[in-house]
Image (cartoon, helix red, strand yellow):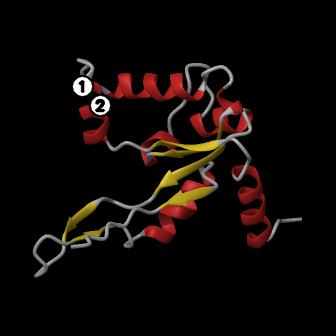
Amino acid sequence: MNRSTKDELQATIIDMVVPCKGILAADESTPTIAKRFAAIGATSTIELQHAYRSLLFTTPGIEKFISGVILFEDTLGQISDDGIPLPEVLVRKCIVPGVKVDKGKIPLANAFGDEITQGLDGLAERLRIYKIQGARFAKWREVYSIS
């Protein structure tokens, strides 16, 4: 019997809202992770990004402190060195995989200094695919400027 959407959402909430645990944001975009690597003198390559995220997710005992991980969409399709999809690596540690779904911000037309978040176009289809890939929750970033 298929679980209802409400049951799935309730199970995700229970699995994520755990005392003394947090959610790890590992959803750096390619430009952002390149900046982080550059700060430590490392050249950002796909291989290094993969190794970094694999190291994070396979850290012994991570499940004692982390209940959920926000992934960048490309990470959902990556495989560990052991041949296991990275979302499944997290699930095996009782960590809920999620995904960042917005597509970044751009200037809002005719509103100097204001920005708008992209990504609503095609979101329903992307969410369907992300769920198949193992994501159980989504993060959407919106920026509000207050002057």
In the rendered image, residue 112, in percent from the top left (x then y), is placed at 10, 75
Q: Is residue 99 left or right of residue 106?
A: right
Is the C-beta separation of discs 2 and 1 under 8 Å? Answer: yes
Residue at image coords 60%, 57%: 137
Name the disc covering residue 5, or none: none
Instruction: Give the total number of marks visible in the rendering.
Output: 2
Image quarter of residue 1: bottom right
80 or 14, nearer to the observer:
14
The residue that appears at 44% across and 46% down in the rendered structure is 72
Q: Label 1 amino acid?
A: Ala
Which secondary structure lies at badge 1? helix
Q: Residue furthest bottom?
A: 110
Left or right of 72 on screen, residue 2: right
Q: Residue at x 33, y 44 (%)?
A: 29
Between 51 and 79, the one lying in front of the other is 51
Disc sitting over residue 39 in the figure: 1
Instruction: Identify the image quadrant of residue 47.
Output: top left
> Residue 58 location, x and y as percent?
61, 24
The location of residue 76, given as percent across then percent down, is 52, 43
Judge whether 102 appears above or below 6 on screen: above
Pointer 2 residue:
36
* Mark 2–mark 1 distance (CA, rounded to whole Å): 5 Å
Q: Secondary structure at mark 2?
A: helix
Q: What residue type is disc 2 on? A: Arg
> On screen, 100 above or below 64?
below
